[in-house]
Image: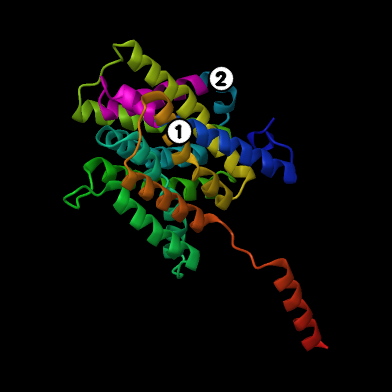
Amino acid sequence: MSGNKLFATGSSSHVKGDILMLVVTMIWGSSYIFMKMGLNTIEGFNLVGLRFGIAFIIAGIIFYKRLLHIDFKTIKYGFVLGTIIFAAISSVTIGVKFTSVSNAGFLFSLTVIFVPLIVALYNRKRPETKIIVGVILSIVGIAFLTLNNNFEVGYGDILIILGALFYAFDIIVTDKWTKDVDSLSLGILQLGFTGAWGMLFSFLFEQPHIPSTTEAWIAILALSILCSAIGFIGQTIAQQYTTPTHTGLIFSLEPVFAAIFAFIFVGEVLTAKGYIGAVLVLIGVLTAKIEFRKPVMKKAYRKIIDESKAC
């Protein structure tokens, strides 16, 4: 069965795509905690290399028959997407070491705002009003969430925001390319290229090694199996059956899951100022993605007026 036929056609496929994206988003919400755990004993690029390398091996073994039929276009797309994901995840992985789990989750959700902004700039069109409002709310929220008493943004927060920008490019490119090739093969290949970049950078700038503690192994395996193999392949497949708007809107729930997991497992809470910022960022993100439609009665009234003019 082709990867493009994993779901039935029709409206039900959109629902299944949205559900799959919701599960992926929940899994990604837990990733910040596992990154924190892994970074206690493993350096950033090393963590990225192991995480995605193991994910690629696992997915490759399970779906090896699909990889036997890949073409050059799929490999090329996988390389580009893997490079973008490496830039995004490396920024987040290193950044989360210098900020809180909750901060990381809310700041990374800015991806949802970056996507329409990039599209608008590419098309040389003025962003929609709701995007502008969302950006303003998010900027104010970021100020509350990240600025210290000296009005400085932390190094980790800057890296998380940069990671969100890179990931916005990944969503845009994935949406365009996943329709042209086998999405499952593409999802597996991007894992391999991301892991390869991670190990290359680790050898160049770090001293790579395998995990030496139980905590580190739990972190690596959770990031590899759940957050990478299932997460990124799931996203690639889901984006075939849902729209970029739905993807972005569902993805905006990730910081909520991150904050919940941070509270449950590490007892992390934000300051009052931080919670105000988090709420503003979330409202800004939702404002940018929600479709505001005119009331039904107003539409009906307008239709009647237009028809009377036509007569």
Residue 119 image position (x, y, % from top left): 46, 60
Residue 80 image position (x, y, % from top left): 41, 42
Earlier in the chain: of badge 1 and badge 2, it is 2
Left or right of 48 on screen, residue 4: right
Q: Is residue 182 visible?
A: no
Q: For the residue marked with disc 2, what is the amino acid?
A: Ile
Left or right of 222 on screen, residue 145: left
Within-10-Å neighbours for mark 2: few <14, some 14–19, many 20+: few
- Prevailing secondary structure of the magenta residues: helix
Residue 229 image position (x, y, % from top left): 49, 27
- Tell me if residue 46 comes above or below residue 93 in the rendering: above
Front disc: 1 or 2:
1
Number of marks drawn? 2
Indicate whether residue 280 is drawn in magenta.
no
Q: Which residue is mark 2?
A: 62
- Quadrant, the C terminus: bottom right
Q: For the residue marked with disc 1, what is the amino acid?
A: Ile
Q: Which residue is mark 1?
A: 260
Q: Which residues are magenta?
A: 32-59
Query: Looking at the image, which is closer to me, 215 or 122?
Result: 215
Q: Secondary structure at mark 2?
A: helix
Residue 76 figure quarter: top left
Marks 1 and 2, Cα distance to the nearest angstrom? 32 Å
Within-10-Å neighbours for mark 1: few <14, some 14–19, many 20+: some
Q: Which mark is residue 44?
A: none
